[in-house]
Amino acid sequence: MKKRWHILFHRAASALGTLLIVASCGTSRYNANPQYPAVNADIRYEGLLEECMYRSSGEGPAQRRMFVYLPEDYYENTDRYPVLYMLHGARGNELSWIRKGNILHNIDSLTSASKMKETIVVFPNVNQYEDEEDYGKSRLKGAMESLFEIDGTVEAAFVNDVVRTIDSLYRTCSDKEHRAIAGLSIGAMQSMYISANAPAMFDYVGLFSSMVHPVLRRSEHSSFYKGLKTKMQTQFSTPPELYYIMVGKADIYYPRMKRFCRYLEKNGYQYRLHISRGGHQWYNWEEFANIFMQYIWQDD
């Protein structure tokens, strides 16, 4: 019983810490109808950015939107490409990495400098929505919603809904060796559990300022977030090519990430660690993404 209360206390403290971070950044305000324009027409990118609607098999809206960034000459050849899935954090959606993380420009720069192999990069929406009205055309969610509505529904359907859709619509290299997933904060935690639940799917995993345990709401999909240690035993029995953890020293999750790294070391799980200055902020996540993208597909 004492151990259980200890775990509950730390999870509650983690959730409170996240709320404080969000509030301190001025992003805890609830916006009932925030409408992002699809793309800023004044910005020119080398690649091709496409909007993709896909059917959602879990409870909630029937369809969701994601953005897909293709190599510049994608439609001029018959090549197949590796795929990177980039997950947003709380108060985000499928445009957060594009609008706040400057990621399309950075992909262009890395590709042009031959520091990154040409890649299909996918930006899905991994928020939990109750129904079409709640979805509200991919609305941003408040901090309280993002933290306390996690129940595994979206994550459990991720491979079937998002990955299978991308593999069916685009010329992907549809194997573990050419598939990567990464995210920030809650999105990093989702990346951790998605990769652990589907160990044969992702050979590259990037965790940026990651939570470790959700404040889980019970549902028929709650088991997705249970038994992480057992699932990781299977995942690391044929280990990912790269398991990259990145966090800032001033990040609220820095102590928890250090403990998680000690757990990985204790079990002999190979990982890479990058520690930066600063905290739970976009300038860190942009840097983390740039570093991670230079390490994927290196075995090729």
Image (spheres, rainbow, N blue to C red):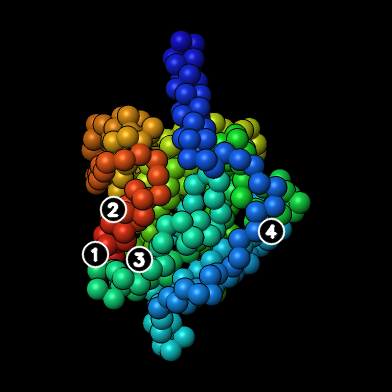
Q: Identify the residue at horizontal 41%, vertical 67% (top origin).
A: 104
Q: Compared with residue 147, is residue 125 higher up or lower down, i.e. above or below?
A: below
Where disc 4 sits, the SS reads loop
Which residue position holds label 2? Answer: 242
Residue 51 in picture, x, y percent from top left = 58, 70
What's the CA distance linking mark 4 and mark 3?
27 Å
Residue 30 in the image: state x and y as whole percent: 64, 42
Q: Nearer the viewer, mark 3 or mark 2?
A: 3
Residue type beneath disc 4: Lys
**Tag on residue 142?**
none
The residue beneath circle 3 is 106
Upstream in the sequence, badge 3 or badge 1?
Answer: 3
Q: Answer few, some or many: residues within 10 Å of disc 3's Cα (few below 14, many 20 plus, some between 14 and 19).
A: some
Nearest the eye: 115 or 217: 115
Q: Quadrant of the C terminus?
A: bottom left
Of residues 160 and 19, the one drawn nearer to the viewer in this rendering: 19
Marks 3, 1: nearer the viewer: 3
The answer to whether marks 2 and 1 mark residues whose Cβ atoms lie closer than 8 Å is yes
Which element is circle 2 on? strand
First reached walking from the N terminus: tag 2 or tag 1: 2
Instruction: Give SS at disc 1.
Output: loop
Q: Which residue is mark 1?
A: 298
Q: CA distance from mark 2 to mark 4?
A: 35 Å
Three-letter amino acid code of the residue under disc 1: Gln
Q: Residue at x 44, y 43 (%)?
A: 185
Few, some or many residues within 10 Å of mark 2 (<14, 14–19, 20+): many
Q: Residues within 10 Å of mark 4 (few under 14, many from 20)?
A: some
The secondary element bearing badge 3 is classed as helix
Label disc, if present, on residue 137 of the rendered structure? 4
Q: Earlier in the sequence, mark 3 or mark 2?
A: 3
